[in-house]
Image (cartoon, grey):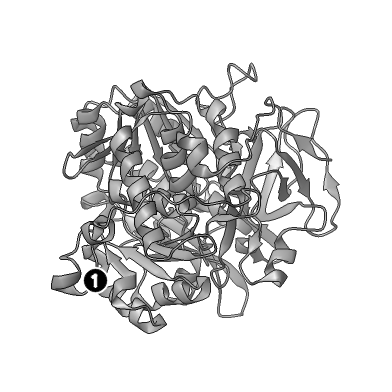
Amino acid sequence: MSFASPFPEVEIPSTSVYEFLFGGITDAELDRIALIDAKSGRETSYREMIGRIDAFAGALAGRGIGVGDVVGLLSPNSSGFAVAFHGILRAGATATTINALFTAKEIAKQLADSRARMLVTVSALAPQARAAAAAVGLADRDLVVLDGEGEQAGGNPNADDLMAPGHPVPQVSFAPSSHLAALPYSSGTTGNPKGVMLTHRNLVANVAQIRPLHGMTPDDVVLAVLPFFHIYGMTVLLNAALHARARLVIMPAFDLGEFLANIQNHRCTIAFIAPPIAVALAKHPLVDEFDLSSLKVVMSGAAPLDADLGHAVADRLGCRVVQGYGMSELSPVSHITPFDAGAHDMKITAPLSSVGWTVSNGISKLVDPQTGAEIDVPTEGLSATGELWFKGPNVMAGYLNNEEATRETIDEDGWLHTGDLARVDAHGCVYIVDRLKELIKYKGYQVPPAELEAVLLSHPAIADAAVVGVPDADGEEVPKAFVVRQPGETGARLTADEVMAFVADQVAPYKKVRQVEFIDAIPKSASGKILRKELRTG
């Protein structure tokens, strides 16, 4: 049986992302600080940011970029990213955001698949951007290096070159329900990356769905370290924070010392993280050297957060820790734990092991992947495990030029099949078990890697871990743990036998880790997902 959101429905205006975020801004709000580049300390007010967005949109229009065109955006987090992203949308074009860690070949592949007419980047990424642009036939003038030397000195226009003509803001017209705002690409951890078509309505809807549940206010100071080029950072940090008129402290990359210093120095009240950051916050001695008392809530997403790890972070930082769930195809949030953990709306506190409730205007259900039968919501305890399906206004329009993949993901009734296994409790809280395609099958039993990873991370000598299925000498798929030792003598003494014995003491016999390999770092995507494919093939 399906279960609808327990939260009140929200109004989703039929408007562009720009109009939704900034159309009703007041004079007082215009003078508030919107963005702080943490590295330089540069502050940008809402007035200045919106002015730069308008100028960027005019510059694109002056170069013939508008409705129906795609512009690539390759950049780490910065105020410049925020301006470029919203400038592209303001011009009526579609932004295909590109992972800042991509190689030239990977960048070129996305540019070609999305048919981008222009690429916007920064100096630090210019070499791979130039190689990619050349590979897909973009002219020098169509590669904008925002902080570069400029068109005369380096051949590529910079931000000043782009906006020097002072073109007016274009008057564009499109249907928000069908016009593409963003074209991020799925992570590719289970196949070839696919362009995820997100309309203006998708992005507007998801901000409208999550804003009342976050409870974010103009007084909040939000630490933005998760990448804006990923849908989590794009919607949950950038768009939602700007809609709330909050202040964003922007970090281009994660560094634990800088992360902690920014919380202390800017008195950050909210931090959005992925589980790898939670591991550092729970275990690293550096945390104790900073005043983190301003922090009210830490929200984890992008991958499952183990409850014990979450509680360790909450206890150490003295703040609330919650988690949510989503995917690029859902713009991205479909399930959320409110910042008060549900105390106000639900009159109960969601367990930290859950990802919370279905967002407003959404419906969920669990389906047995073997039989196709719907799984009932229990009257008490937890339901059986099933694949999580979701329906709502934040469901993508489909995969770009890939009708087959779209049909495999969104059925005729509009249900998006997430590919994630989950359970639901009597209150409607959802618990993610694991990826359907990442389950290890050992002698007919299903072994969820995330469960074993949570056990491994509880070992004091283990800094990080990942588990994948690999064939043994007999061809049987067995769980293999990749382990990063904690620095120092304790970690150095840890052996594979000790790791296997530690896990064996805490799980059913069929779930035991049967192989261990020590490595320097677990490969992860920018959003914090473990790249299991690299571990299997590496």
- The reply to whether residue 486 is in sight is yes
* Image-quadrant location for residue 400: bottom right
Image quarter hosting the N terminus: top right
To which quarter of the image does residue 362 belong?
top right
The residue labelled by disc 1 is 156
Between 136 and 261, the one lying in front of the other is 136
Q: Residue at x 56, y 45 (%)?
A: 203
Along the viewing direction, whichever of 172 and 124 lies nearer the viewer: 172
Q: Position of residue 105 (x, y in %)?
A: 39, 79
Q: Position of residue 219 (x, y in %)?
A: 36, 21
**Does residue 101 appear anywhere in the picture?**
no
Q: Is residue 373 left or right of residue 92?
A: right
Say which amino acid is labelled 1.
Asn
Q: Residue 389 placed where, x, y %?
A: 73, 49
- Provide residue 106's location: percent of width, then percent of height: 41, 74
- Which image quadrant for residue 403? bottom right
Q: Nearer the viewer, residue 54 or 490?
A: 54
- Taking 9 as reference, is 180 above or below it? below
* Mark 1 nearby-residue class (10 Å; few <14, some 14–19, many ≥20): many
Under tag 1, what secondary structure? loop
Above or below residue 355? Residue 402 is: below
Residue at position x 61%, y 40% in the image: 205
Q: Residue at x 35, y 60 (%)?
A: 495
> For this view, does 40 lie left or right of residue 385?
left
Q: Quadrant of the C terminus?
A: bottom left
